[in-house]
């Protein structure tokens, strides 16, 4: 299966990407990053930077569950939505609340 490093050297989401994510799913700190539709959308936002013609379903075909979780966690960390260092029991889930 593909991973984001092979697909795109830009791993972080831009402010525009984060705004798109909020428009689709609501406030960042309320988004459930355990939903497959959300995870696929996050991957699509990152991949479309180098492949503007790619659609969400095609992105979904490139990842299995393990590679998808690892890659989304990396994208969210690189975007500042998750801390750099994993906390006890951290997994893909709700983004931390904003202070």
Image: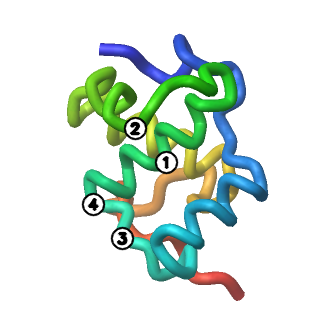
The tag earlier along the polypeptide, 2 or 4, is 4
Q: Quadrant of residue 72?
A: top left
Judged from the image, the secondary structure of the residue bearing numbered disc 2 is helix
Q: State the residue lying farthest toward the right.
A: 15
Helix, strand or loop at label 3? It is loop
Q: Earlier in the sequence, mark 3 or mark 1?
A: 3
Residue 56 numbered mark, or none: 2
Could you tell which of marks 1 and 4 lies nearer the N-terminus? 4
The alpha-carbon separation of the residues under discs 2 and 4 comes to 14 Å
Image quadrant in which the N terminus is located: top left
* Picture layout, residue 54 above or below residue 34: above
Circle nearer the viewer, 2 or 1: 2
User: Disc 4 marks which residue?
Assistant: 35
Label 3 crowd (10 A; few <14 / some 14-19 / many >=20): some
Q: CA distance from mark 3 to mark 2?
A: 18 Å
Picture quadrant of residue 98: bottom right
Q: For numbered disc 4, what is the local secondary structure? A: loop
The residue that disc 3 covers is 32
* Numbered label attached to residue 27: none
Q: Is residue 71 left or right of residue 27?
A: left
Judging depth in this view, the residue of 14 and 84 nearest the camera is: 14
Question: Mark 1 = which residue?
Answer: 42
Q: Label 4: few (<14), some or many (≥20) within 10 Å?
A: few
**Does 2 appear above or below 69?**
above
Q: Mark 4 and mark 3 in contact (Cβ < 8 Å)?
A: yes
Residue 66 in the image: state x and y as whole percent.
25, 33
Report the front residue among 15 and 67.
15
């Amino acid at each position: 299966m593909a991973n984001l490093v092979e697909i795109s050297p830009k791993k972080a989401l831009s402010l525009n990407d984060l705004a798109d994510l909020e428009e689709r799913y609501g406030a960042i700190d309320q988004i459930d990053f355990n939903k497959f539709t959300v995870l696929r959308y996050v991957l699509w936002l990152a991949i479309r930077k180098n492949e503007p013609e790619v659609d969400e379903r095609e992105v979904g075909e490139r990842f299995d569950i393990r590679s998808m979780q690892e890659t989304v966690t990396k994208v969210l960390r690189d975007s500042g939505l998750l801390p750099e260092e994993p906390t006890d029991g951290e997994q893909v889930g709700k983004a931390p609340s904003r202070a």
